[in-house]
Image (spheres, helix red, strand yellow):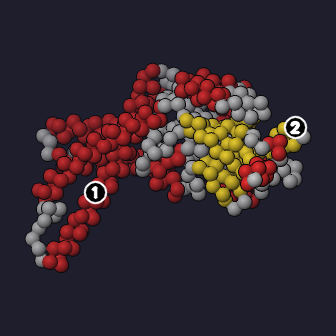
Amino acid sequence: MRFLIAVILSLSIIYGYVGFRLVQPAGLARGLKIFFWGLVLLFFAAPFLSIFLRSKMPTDSISMIVSWIAYLSFGFFTLIFAVLVIRDGLLLVSTMAELLYRFVTNSAKLAFTNPSRRLFLVNGTNLGVLGLTGALTAYGLVQARKTPQVRQVDIFLENLPDEFNGFRILQLSDLHVSMTIRRDYVERVVERANGEKPDLIVFTGDLADGGAHALRVEAAPLADLQAPHGKFFVTGNHEYYSGVEGWLAEVRKWGFVPLLNEHRSIRLGAADIVLAGVTDYRAERIKPSHATNPGAALAGAPEKRVKIMLAHQPKSVFGAEATGADLLICGHTHGGQYIPYTYMVPLDQPYVHGLHKHGKTWIYVSRGTGYWGPPIRVGAPSEITVLRLAGQSELIAGSG
């Protein structure tokens, strides 16, 4: 209930602020003003209507149409909210600067503090704000819907056996199969992933936004992913929102091995490495028996082996480092996905995207293979990641 109240309050602030800064100053006739405020209220209600229809009619075309309208408009409103806040911040700074100038010089009123001129400036820049936001929304939609590019990343692990030098791990994460990400998108992802011919495939959570009963057919092409050393899966927070046991049953059918605070040995020739996986960082809030436990994930693992851990959230890096993991592979952040979230994610997570060194542990954070909510990506492109392991022998060869 508290979460629902927080969501309603946040959306009320966003949609209300946009309405008050665009509709109110426009000097419209009463009928037009009521019409545009009605549109704002309609778009405000659309996400809640979409969630209701998805629960009642998960395969109906009406649900999909409403979802597209709801989430695309939500993306537009959050983008325009961010742009308006920046614009109004600049107006506030200019007004304060002018007031200070008048106080010091005892000058007459200038442009920013004159009410009529200020209203003209607000309405004039509102047109620019609408144009900019419309362009960003269109650009973000194209970026979100295109097939993710492959991102190649080399990771040096000091004690990696020679047999694993050049070993390629393909990571998918945050696919978020939903009312707007359907089977055709999943098929394109699978085709591009298989084209990389990886040695091993990992999926680091948030497969879908909805129950397996409604979305299993849309996500089923994941069964066609192929890698000689197997496919592995760890849970994300959205698995717990959507019915984790149902999705775990599905991924097992598709050939994935779920790693729920456990590990496996990956053997190549006479050598092996350890691949561990933990449940989502906050899983215990919904399913207490799935409380994340990096220590349990590596319990009984052979000593002096390279240890790679899979997790959904970058916050798991603290537990991973404490266990001596050499590499943590995760997702969750979407790289911020688009403004204003690009500036909010660092408030919650220690790393947002890319490769980092945390103490003695490397951490790689994917921007995600799909998107969540609004079908928009600006400045944070989706990705299919190929992590290529490099060891001491390659370092020596390179230095020579």
Q: Are marks 2 and 1 in contact (CB under 8 Å)?
A: no
Please name the residue shown 55% across and 35% down the image: 149
Residue 19 image offset from top left, x and y in percent: 27, 46
**Which mark, by number, is residue 195?**
none
Please name the residue shown 59% across and 49% down the image: 354
Task: Tell me which label, 2 or 1, sits earlier in the chain.
Answer: 1
Mark 2 is surrounded, within 10 Å at the Cα level, by few (under 14), some (14 to 19) or many (20 or more) other residues, namely: few
Q: Nearer the viewer, mark 2 or mark 1?
A: 2
Residue 110 image offset from top left, x and y in percent: 13, 65
Three-letter code, disc 1: Asp
Residue 300 visible = no
Q: Does residue 337 appear left or right of residue 215 in this picture?
A: left
From this viewpoint, which residue is outermost toward the left?
108
From this viewpoint, which residue is outermost toward the right?
270
Residue 116 image offset from top left, x and y in percent: 11, 56
Residue 370 image offset from top left, x and y in percent: 54, 36
Residue 23 visible = yes
Three-letter code, disc 2: Gly
Label 1 sits on residue: 88
Choose top left, top right, bottom left or bottom right for residue 263: top right
Choose top left, top right, bottom left or bottom right for residue 135: top left
Choose top left, top right, bottom left or bottom right for residue 76: top left
Label 2 sits on residue: 269
56 up-or-down from 7: above or below = above
